[in-house]
Image (cartoon, rainbow, N blue to C red):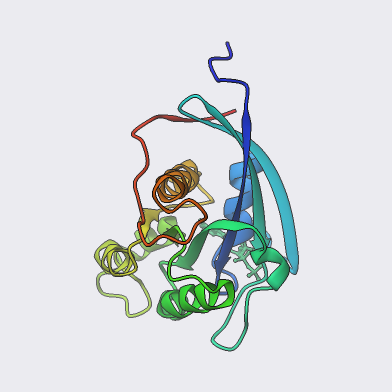
Amino acid sequence: MNTTNGLSKHRKIAVVGARNVGKSSLTVQYVESHFVESYYPTIENQFTKQVVLGKTNYTLEICDTAGQDEFSLVNTKSLIGLKGVAIVYSCVNRASFEIVELIRDKIIDQLGLEHIPTVVVANKIDLREELGDGGDSVAAVTRLEGAALAKRLNAGFVECSAKLNVGVNDVVLQLLKRIEGHDLTGGNGNGSNGGNGGETGCIVI
Ligand SMILES: Nc1nc2c(ncn2[C@@H]2O[C@H](COP(=O)(O)OP(=O)(O)OP(=O)(O)O)[C@@H](O)[C@H]2O)c(=O)[nH]1
Ligand SMILES: [Mg+2]
């Protein structure tokens, strides 16, 4: 049954973050519904997926980027027309958490904006659970720490596991809602409102 209005809006999003945090695994889990066990460092990959939010069809262009470090910039090509970013860290790798803000700052600098709709994503929660809550591990990043950072960045926050397919759809749902709230208030993506968008359901088709 198709209840949408037949229009499809194009939205480009990028998946960024340090190396080896699971950006490609999350993207592949979201788009192709399977988990990639092996590690192949990414140069750059594009994916597309149709999503319905409320009564609107979206064609999502998802840019899976090469992992960043303190010194790298996201490829300019990935940033052209970008509407939102998912910044991924591994919750069992503190260094990857510590560069989230820097990565965000560099992206908005490169784009010449003050704000871009953002979701901070804590991946690999299955491994933190294996460590036993993460509270005692220096490397592990707790949910509270992740949520506090996201709040400070005026971003959404999702904890997930690409391996177990937990929270993966929620990353896109939250980001799309933020993009739409942002577009409604900021028009061309220049506003400063992180926006929650409408409380409509998101169906992945
Ligand atoms: N246990 C567990 N392993 C994961 C998870 N997500 C990814 N991995 C593993 O972590 C490794 C790195 O995953 P990738 O998705 O390639 O990481 P990436 O961020 O794309 O890496 P770069 O492209 O180099 O930046 C792989 O061996 C994945 O199988 C997860 O949620 N849980
Ligand atoms: Mg990758």
Residue at the limit of the structure toward the front, as seen here: 187
When asked about the image quadrant of residue 92, the answer is: bottom left
Nearer to me, 200 or 49: 200
Residue drawn at (69%, 73%), measured in percent from left and top? 75
Nearer to me, 67 or 125: 67
Residue drawn at (47%, 68%), measured in percent from left and top? 89
Ligand 1 rendered quadrant: bottom right
Q: For the C terminus, which image quadrant?
A: top right
Residue at the limit of the structure toward the bottom, as seen here: 71
When asked about the image quadrant of residue 50, the answer is: top right
Q: For the N terminus, which image quadrant?
A: top right
x, y percent for residue 97? 42, 74
Using residue 6 as the reference point, say whether residue 178 is left or right of it. left
User: Looking at the image, is 134 positioned above or below residue 31?
Assistant: below
x, y percent for residue 3? 53, 15
Residue at the limit of the structure toward the top, as seen here: 1
Using residue 111 as the reference point, say whether residue 184 is left or right of it. left
x, y percent for residue 29? 60, 46
Residue drawn at (57%, 71%), measured in percent from left and top? 111
